[in-house]
Amino acid sequence: MSNAKSKPRFTRRGFLKGAGYAAAGLTVTYLVGRNFAPILPSLATPEIKGEAWITVSPDGKVSMLSPVHEMGQGSSLGLAQIVAEELNVDIATITVKFPSTRDIPHMRFTTGSEAIALHARPVAEAAASLREELRRKAAVITGLNPEALKDTTGGFTTEEDRYLTYADIVGGSELTLAEDNLPASHAYTFDASRKKRQIGRTALQVQALEIVTGGPIFAGDIRRPNMAFGRAVQAPAPDARIIEIHDGGADTMPGVIQVVIDVPRGLVGVVAETPGALDNALEQIEVKWDRPGSFSAEDIAAQVDVDTALSSGRLEHSIVDDDINTSEAWTVDMRFDLPILHHATQEPRTAVAEFSLRNGQEVVDIWTGTQDIFVNQKKAAADLDWSPDRVTIHAMRVGGGFGGRVLYDVVREAVLLAQHVKRPVKVHWSRRDEFLADRTRPPSSHRVQIRTDTVGHITDWRHACVSGHVLLTELMAPQPLLSVMRMAMHDFGASRELVAPYNAQHRRIEMSDVELPFHAGEWRSLGACPNVFAIESAIDELARKLGKNPVEFRLQNLGSSRVRLKNCLSRVKAMCDTHPHQSIPGIGRGFACGIYQEHSYVAAAFDVVVDYEQQEIRAERCYVALDVGLAISPDQIKAQIEGCAMMAIGQLLMETAPIDDSGLASISFSDYPTPLMGDTPEFEIEIIDNSSIPPAGVGQAPIIATVPALANAIRDATGYRTLKLPVSFDDLPIPDE
Amino acid sequence: MQLKINGATYEVEDVWSEETLLTVLRERLGFVGAKFGCGHGDCGACTVHVDGLPTRSCYISAQDVETNEIVTIEGLSSPQTQLHPVQQAWLDERVAQCGYCQAGQIMQAAALLAENPAPDDQAINEFMRDNLCRCGTQARVRKAIHRAASQMRGQS
């Protein structure tokens, strides 16, 4: 055994030691997006570098910091599978850790289904560099050429069958690779000719064991010495201002530590010794808000009424503006209305904040589940008037995201309350607050008009849409800058996938975005889900009107460049064909398809049964074909598809956020029903093997097809076209008998 | 106040006596497996066993169960086995997505199998009805329950 020893190289990443992470072993950086934009949100730009780490410890074990937050989408597992592939180790032996803001200088916010799409290559290349560095060191030990060392599980083998493990190679030494000195590497992940061993296999989710045994992985599971419990009063509307507060004697109630009224920073809250004392005290507090007048559900519907908007001419923003013929009759002319939706994640927002002294300086540590640790760090620092390096955010697992965990909200409350009472404080939102302060999917309405020629080719396509804001919200900028942005551009979240993939000679695609009197924001797939719902419902109706098979008609009108989408549709059709289908009243099958963010292709079908005796609509079977290029974790991809199918059932049959004259009105889950165990269909899912194409996003794409597929199945079963969501049994026509 | 949890007795100070069982388990005693989801017993994330019955711990007072045997997910498996068959089935079917509701789902499922060793889909739908999961893991929950049931029948 050689005693060759690497000399430690100290780089600017020396602080890793301070974080107690790379105490020994071999660590490598990889390049992910980085940016120094002032506060909102943490976006990557391709030309700027950031970093995260993969380490081989002295015992040869591989661990990594996840460069993405985990909220059940499974991308931390996918990235670990890439590392396992590159380093020739079993995925089950890799430890995945979630970093704090002290462990890494930057991390992009985890959103838009981009975790794998953006990080697969840098992670693969970094891991490949690490592998080649290990090979180089093994060559030094054996006195052989690196090329003479063959990849073997957990190490290398010489031509004489001498096996060197990674433990042998790192030999207790410590080494940090600088990113300007990485050995040339070849990422196995993107080598289409290579048979994959870790990529593409079924593996256990990151933290699966903790989940089934109750291990502390969520923010609420954190307990600190002398911790108190706090909660703030939630503002009922964007920009609502407090005008009057009555504390109702809460201050002197048993267990209450302090009623906090922080006028400069706009916070009213309570801190107590126990959660129950906190609840009792909060019930006594009355806050009067300065806010726009009351409104009704009808007012909101009128605000997003596309026909009213069109009656005064063009909509505010033109997306595609061909010269279309508006004087002749349309082949189909349909209006769709989609309601307000809640995220309704199982975990209410939670954060724990603790102030302490570090090297004589006051600092704060915060544990929370968020899709963006760095925006929370910077905003908390701004609230404290501190430099960001004094604020540490510890990323905890997120108990459901779906776009609803991107903002600075609960962290702010925990930090300010902890600062006031000078004790660690846990803030755990109530279910009511979760609904009240949810950044909902805004309602939208759509007018879709299509005209075909005599052989069924589309000549004119018009889609006009009015929606609340999705991305042009507090996420992007504070007021008054936000108002300027709203005037200058259209909401590019609400307009997502508004342009249909079908060929049309002339198109007019336009939208207006309106300011709503309650919170709205990012919801799984943003505007794509409502927009594709309108598109796929209209094309389905058009096929029926022309007496065409809905799948054949779609294939006919998708251009020759839509090969991958057509393949998905054909695959779903083939899956359906294995389950013969009777077209009789009460039984239906519907199809839909779509392209999400250019690179994710999906087609879906549902079989439904309308049970006239039980008076219910049942989704019996769901078929999905998805092509996202290289499928790194097929089982996790299937899980995302299953989730998108369940959410389709929710959207079609039950979900609509109630509002009353003061705003969002849900108090408990019973006010916002979501699918239950008995609503679950059978699944047939095909992940199309397209391993030569880099991986695209998975978490949102399926939902753009599952929702309209279910509506089209109901149409097939009953003749009823769902124009307004959700649909109930009572909306359906009674069949003649 | 004393509580019997997972076979051991815990002394709890009076300041906690008005709190819910969930709060005492999580915040005072550190059994954080059961989760707060709604505070109204609607979602099932807080499910534990009280004298063997699945119980919403967010909706009962700790002092009301002073004389009862409480089992949380931390105490679900027997001391001899690392995992209860339901927990193992959850791993085998890779049920969890975000994972927040799963401890409650597992406790509810274990109670179902204690009562009915061979539930059909209908029985599972009924018994698991009020355990919400927003990620949409229901199909896998059902598969895992069938898997655990068959495993447990094989053992007995």
Image (tube, coloured by chain):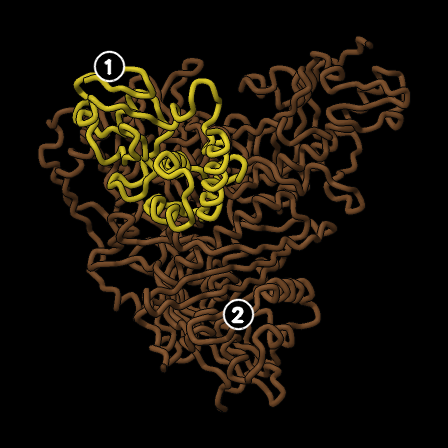
Chain colours: A brown, B yellow
Which residue in the structure is indicated by mark 1? B11
Give the quadrant of residue A276: top left
Q: Give the residue type that dot 1 points to.
A: Glu
Protein chain holding label 2: A
User: Are there few (<14), some (14-19), or many (20+) residues within 10 Å of tag 2?
Assistant: some
Say left or right for A80 vs A142.
left
Give the quadrant of residue B56: top left
Query: Residue A613's mark?
Result: none
Which residue in the structure is indicated by mark 2? A319
Q: Is residue A318 above or below residue A476?
A: below
> Under tag 1, what secondary structure?
strand
Q: Nearer the viewer, residue A110 or A609?
A: A609
In percent of the image, x 56 and y 77: which residue is there?
Answer: A507
In percent of the image, x 37 and y 42: which residue is there?
Answer: A346
The N terminus of chain A lies in which quarter of the figure? top right
Give x and y (percent) for residue A220. 36, 31
Q: Give the residue type that dot 2 points to.
A: Ile
Q: Is residue B2 above or below residue A520?
A: above
Give x and y (percent) for residue A647. 43, 55
Q: Is residue A383 visible?
A: no
Give the quadrant of residue B63: top left
Give x and y (percent) for residue A672. 30, 53
Protein chain holding label 1: B
> Under tag 2, what secondary structure?
strand
Q: Is residue A681 visible?
A: yes
